[in-house]
């Protein structure tokens, strides 16, 4: 792998480096999960030469991690916990990393107590008088069945005591957190957003229930370095795709789709974040990886990294996440905002993308404008390769 740190668009355009665009069969904008996986597949399975450019100074996209204070591995763009039910994704990534088993746990600061999130039967027990908690538990089990997960918006459709409980959970866990995170109410977003964190009719206090839950043993950046380490792949960091000479074919774009088209149908809304990292001279600052603050503070949650990495150090590093509106060019478009209105705003861009099919492909959290987890971004890249790119290159598309 050749990485060209601090050699930006100027050097490329002047052609002064050993890098020349004509040497590459494919150009990929973005070295995150989507771009890196596609580069690896095209390089290793089709024996084509790939140039990956990223305008950031590093690979790994939003999953980028590096050693912070106390030697603790921190995630520059917020806590990234790997989980998947897709065995194919798990097997694919396992070729590039060993894993450290890790099940993420989250507590919510509610009414002065720390209770499990997703809200479960133990959260109920912690927040209600014993007798009421017991009768509500019985009602939940009778209504939904033990072990089930119930989206809060579904639960609010019930009547009687269940509706009152649902309204309580909605008010204490979802309403203010969602207003902070999205500047929208839960019901204004696609129902799948709040359903990511369902009410659990069980005492399972894990944040995720996926069959594979682990962290890359040496971190994400190390895993990406291995994914991209192929003689057919060159990587140029600090290089914006838009600064490259016009390239009309064999392009994969994993940046924001509206930006690619010069915002010609209007800028798509994204949500951004500001991260506040800080170190403490204590062994452990909070009992679990993440504590959510639905109703207090301007931040939504605090994550303590050593829970994720398993590192034993005398000090610790934490990060607070402060949601912000997105301003193109000023901060990062971290979250596409899944609402029906935004699906309509996206449509003309999808149509414009379709018109370029066979020349330029769009994929990823920003390229598809879709709220993907890492495994979904990886699965999308693998599917795009198998169903479109490989047949196209082999001539049987
Ligand atoms: P990205 O990682 O965003 O990569 C796109 C890359 O393209 C970027 O590096 C960008 O610099 C580059 N780029 C954009 N435009 C251009 C251009 N014009 N020229 C050159 N380069 C360009 N997922 C999980 O599974 N678990 C988690 O715990 C989790 N936590 C998250 C926490 C936060 C705060 C955020 C924001 C996301 C989290 N995710 C999590 C989601 C995860 O980050 C994404 O699923 C994943 O990063 C998507 O990969 P991608 O390659 O599509 O996009
Ligand atoms: N959510 C909430 N309260 C919580 C946790 C989550 O209201 O304590 C809602 C909120 O709308 C959030 C969504 O559920 O944006 C998805 O949460 P998740 O933790 O999956 O978000 P991410 O890690 O992607 O930021």
Image (cartoon, helix red, strand yellow):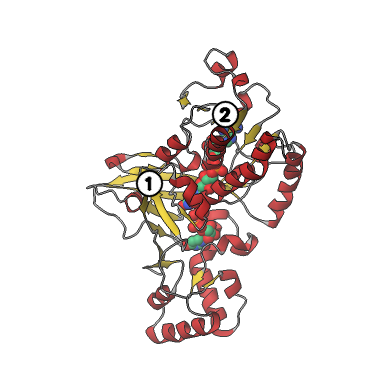
Q: Position of residue 348 (x, y in %)?
A: 76, 44
> In the image as oriented, which residue stretches furthest toward the left?
314
Q: Is residue 65 left or right of residue 12?
A: left
Q: Is residue 67 left or right of residue 91?
A: left
SS for callout 2: strand
Q: Is residue 185 above or below residue 333?
A: below
- Mark on residue 125? none
Q: Position of residue 142 (x, y in %)?
A: 52, 85
Q: Is residue 287 visible?
A: yes
Q: Quadrant of residue 127?
A: bottom left
SS for callout 1: loop
Question: Disc 1 marks which residue?
Answer: 98
Q: Residue at x 54, y 18 (%)?
A: 19
Q: Quadrant of the C terminus?
A: top right
**Sequence-first disc among 1 and 2:** 2
Q: Position of residue 313 (x, y in %)?
A: 24, 47
Q: Position of residue 114 (x, y in %)?
A: 37, 66
Please state which of residues 299 and 237 is positioned toward the viewer in this rendering. Answer: 237
Report whether the residue tagged 2 is closer than 8 Å to ligand 1. no
Mark 1 near mark 2, Cβ–Cβ under 8 Å?
A: no
Question: Disc 2 marks which residue?
Answer: 50
Query: How crowded is the residue under tag 1: few (<14 C-alpha within 10 Å), some, or many (20+)?
Result: some
């Amino acid at each position: 792998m050749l990485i060209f740190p601090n050699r930006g668009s100027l050097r490329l355009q002047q052609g002064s480096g050993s890098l020349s665009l004509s040497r590459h069969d494919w150009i990929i904008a973005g070295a995150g999960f989507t771009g890196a996986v596609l580069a690896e597949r095209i390089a290793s399975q089709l024996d084509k030469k790939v140039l990956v450019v990223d305008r950031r100074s590093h690979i790994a996209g939003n999953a980028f991690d590096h050693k912070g204070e106390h030697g603790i591995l921190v995630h520059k763009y917020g806590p990234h916990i790997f989980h998947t039910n897709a065995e194919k994704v798990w097997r694919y990534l396992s070729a590039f990393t060993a894993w450290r088993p890790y099940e993420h746990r989250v507590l919510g600061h509610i009414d002065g107590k720390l209770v499990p999130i997703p809200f479960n039967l133990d959260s109920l027990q912690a927040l209600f008088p014993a007798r009421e908690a017991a009768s509500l538990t019985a009602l939940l089990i009778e209504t939904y069945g033990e072990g089930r997960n119930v989206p809060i918006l579904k639960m609010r459709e019930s009547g009687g005591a269940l509706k009152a409980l649902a309204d309580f959970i909605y008010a204490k866990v979802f309403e203010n957190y969602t207003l902070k995170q999205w500047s929208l109410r839960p019901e204004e977003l696609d129902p799948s957003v709040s359903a990511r964190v369902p009410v659990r009719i069980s005492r399972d206090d894990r944040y995720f229930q996926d069959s594979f839950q682990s962290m890359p043993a040496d971190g994400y950046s190390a895993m990406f370095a291995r994914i991209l380490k192929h003689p057919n792949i060159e990587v140029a960091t600090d290089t914006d795709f838009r600064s490259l000479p016009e390239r009309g074919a064999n392009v994969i774009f994993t940046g924001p789709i509206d930006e690619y088209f010069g915002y010609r149908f209007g800028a798509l809304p994204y949500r951004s974040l500001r991260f506040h990292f800080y170190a403490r001279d204590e062994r452990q600052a909070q009992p679990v990886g993440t504590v959510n603050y639905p109703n207090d503070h301007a931040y939504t949650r605090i994550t303590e990294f050593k829970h994720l990495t398993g590192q034993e150090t005398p000090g610790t590093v934490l990060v607070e996440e402060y949601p912000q509106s997105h301003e193109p060019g000023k901060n990062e478009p971290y979250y596409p905002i899944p609402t029906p209105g935004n699906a309509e705003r996206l449509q003309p861009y999808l149509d414009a993308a379709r018109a370029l099919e066979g020349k330029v492909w769009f994929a990823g959290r920003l390229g598809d404008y879709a709220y993907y987890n890492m495994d979904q971004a990886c699965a999308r890249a693998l599917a795009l390769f198998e169903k479109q790119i490989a047949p196209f290159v082999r001539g049987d598309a």
